[in-house]
Image (cartoon, helix red, strand yellow):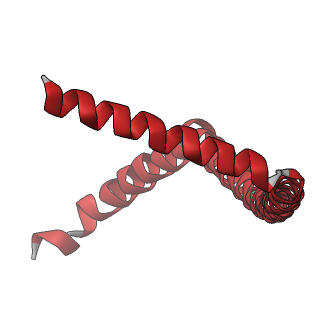
Amino acid sequence: MPQFDKITFFNQIFWLILIFSSFYFILLKNFLPKIGSVLKARNKKLLKSNSLAEQFKSEELSVLADSNRVFVGTAALCRTNLFNGVGKSDNWLDSSQKTLLVSDLKNTQEEYFKSFGKISAKRYLF
């Protein structure tokens, strides 16, 4: 078999070791440091983005809590103001109703009916 020829065996082993060792040293000196630096930079970038994502998540939770607190406070304030306004208007209506004189209302009602009669009479006369 020609692979095990004693004459060319040493020659083949020598060139095999020389080529693979030179390939190994080229990889070791040129390409592996670049690949290592890329991997380190990628790892740092991932760690930084994860920490920023956690910060954004905590900030989002605090903003949601604050917005809920503000919404609940605003709703309570609106409810209080609405009930105060309704109470004040009820009090105003009660007080104005008590202060009106019955005679004033009667006079106003009589005037109204008189004007209503004039309008209906004019309609039928023309």
Q: Where 86 sits versus 19, above or below?
A: below
Residue 17 percent coordinates (x, y): 45, 55
Q: What residue is at 76 percent from the left and 59 percent from the top?
A: 71
Q: Nearer the viewer, residue 89 or 126?
A: 126
Q: Where 34 sits versus 80, above or below?
A: above
Residue 105 percent coordinates (x, y): 70, 50
Residue 104 percent coordinates (x, y): 75, 45
Q: Is residue 76 left or right of residue 125?
A: right
Query: Can you say which quadrant of the picture contains the C terminus?
Result: top left
Q: What residue is at 90 percent from the left and 57 percent from the top?
A: 95
Query: Can you say which quadrant of the picture contains the N terminus?
Result: bottom left
Name the quadrant containing residue 58: bottom right
Q: What residue is at 52 percent from the left and 44 percent from the top?
A: 27
Name the quadrant containing residue 115: top left
Q: Where 125 sits versus 51, above or below?
A: above
Residue 45 percent coordinates (x, y): 68, 47
Res. 95 in view: yes
Q: Is residue 26 left or right of residue 57?
A: left
